[in-house]
Amino acid sequence: MPIYFYSEREQPYGVFSNFSPHGFIVDGRYYPTSEHYFQAQKFVDSPDDYEAIATARKPKIAADRGRERSRPLRSDWNAVKDDVMRIALRAKFDAHTELRELLLSTGTETLIEKTSTDYYWGCGTDGTGKNRLGELLEKLRETYRVEPAV
């Protein structure tokens, strides 16, 4: 039976959302959510844009700013976005034992970000999306089975 998640307010799996308030540190810097980290990474070559996103008051603001195409998106974004998400997820789940335990408790179930608008990270309206966020969480779950958190 697949496990669906989307909103950080849904229990118990809403914590798999990038909007969940589970901060972490990457490269010596604190990010309040994985959404903050992910969206900021789009603008590593533009310090002002990076800061505006990394320090946004809420993850929704970080997401909206990160999607603004008036900002100078890094040229290699499509090539690195999955790796950026992988780093964010590993840092988030390493930093929060309870999240790691919940992820491991899902066994071998398929994890699906149930969103109607995102056909890359989620399943999309009709379920034909790539569900990359769910897939990356499943891979992280497998990683934790063989190697502990750092």
Image: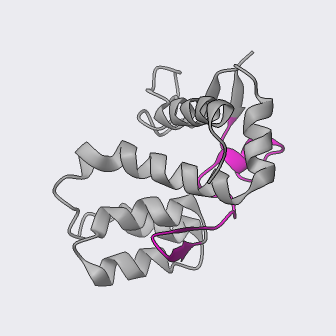
Residue 50, percent across and down?
A: 35, 76
Residue 46's place in the image compared with 33, above or below, is: below
Residue 92, percent across and down?
A: 62, 56
Residue that appears at 63% across and 49% down: 17
Residue that appears at 65% across and 54% down: 94
Residue 118's place in the image compared with 57, above or below, is: above
User: Which quadrant, please, contains the N terminus?
Assistant: top right
Residue 111, percent across and down?
A: 64, 28
Q: Left or right of 17: which side holds 14? A: right
26 in the magenta segment: yes
Where does the magenta region start and end? 5-31
Q: Left or right of 25: which side holds 48? A: left
Name the residue nearer the viewer: 83 or 74.
83
Q: How many marks?
A: 0
Q: Is residue 107 visible?
A: yes
Q: Left or right of 97: which side holds 150? A: left
Q: How is the image coloured?
A: one colour
Q: Is residue 9 visible?
A: no
Residue 91 is drawn in which quadrant? Answer: bottom right
Residue 9's place in the image compared with 131, above or below, is: below
**Residue located farthest toward the bottom when viewing the structure as drawn:** 48
Name the residue nearer the viewer: 139 or 17.
139
